[in-house]
Amino acid sequence: MALTENQITRYSRHILLQGVGGVGQQTLLNSRVLVVGAGGLGSPVSLYLAASGVGTIGVVDADEVELSNLQRQIAHRTDDIGRAKVASAAAAIAEINPDVTVEQHPYRLNVDNALELVSSYDFVVEGTDNFPTKFLVNDACVFAQKPFSIGGILRFQGSTITHTPGSACYRCVFRNPPPKDAVPTCSQAGVFGAVAGMLGTVQAAETVKYLLGIGELLTDRVLSFDALTMEWRRASVSRDHNCPVCGDSPSITELVEAEQPSCALRPGETAGHEAENNKTATGEPAGRDRP
């Protein structure tokens, strides 16, 4: 189907780009992306995908909007407090672009629904605040051979990795969830609101690049940054042939859901000190600033 006059005008700045054009824009309009989490990362991801003209956006989230969300979760407004996040996000998307169809999934992603859900989309973006969901998204997408972006933020930091079939998956880099009491949460350690927008737009860009088949993706690389210093780093990683999910002889052959680790900060201890003493193999803090 050819673009309408209104669409040509709406997406004109995309259409002018080499590698996009009218054909690429039509590809976006025919694409389906699943966004897991309608919070700090899912908000900018969803809004930029909508503005870019991704035709169908699925949003998965079981939560309702709370006042404390509004410091960073830009898809929601004060009047949305108490409203389901998927409904609030859908309304925000509709205001930006009526071309977009939003598929609302007002429930938690789990072992019973993850594989079927990710299988119905072209690309999956994970932006939740818990490790079990990150590993579940990874495993389901690897099983379904679906590409994905996983991101995480904490305090002033953010990091992300993109996976396409054959590249390093999340478990290649972070084999298992961190142990209990190793990781503070955003509600304990805090998060700089703009960090969510910084990382979410990176994930949105990765998604659009994949759908269009342009540029270089963050496959086999972990991108991380510190908003306080504006230092950005890329750490090279590689597919682990012993990975329990995507390796040559996988030991995980069905979806499993790990227990959510939590960190009870001791009196007088700061989350920053906690993270400094818990480093991952890539040198990144072991909090949610790893993706």
Image: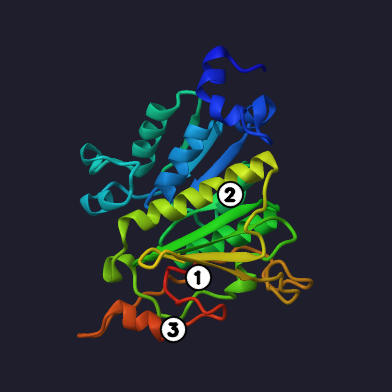
Can residue 117 be seen here? The reply is no
Residue 215 horizontal/vertical position (percent): 67, 48
As drawn, the label of residue 258 is 1
Give the Cα distance between marks 3 and 2: 29 Å
As drawn, the label of residue 278 is 3
Comparing marks 1 and 3, which lies closer to the viewer?
3
Dot 3 amino acid type: Asn
Q: Are marks 1 and 2 in contact (CB under 8 Å)?
A: no
Q: Nearer the viewer, residue 45 or 113?
A: 45
Give the Cα distance between marks 1 and 2: 27 Å
First-in-chain label (1 vs 3): 1
Report the residue at 68% width, 52% height from top: 144
Q: Nearer the viewer, residue 177 or 93?
A: 93
Identify the residue position indicated by label 2 in the image.
Answer: 206
First-in-chain label (3 vs 2): 2
Give the Cα distance between marks 1 and 3: 20 Å
Comparing marks 3 and 2, which lies closer to the viewer?
2
- Label 2, secondary structure: give it: helix
Q: Quadrant of residue 219?
A: bottom right
- Label 1, secondary structure: give it: loop
Instruction: Decide if residue 234 is on the left or right side of residue 279.
Output: right
Residue 12 horizontal/vertical position (percent): 55, 24
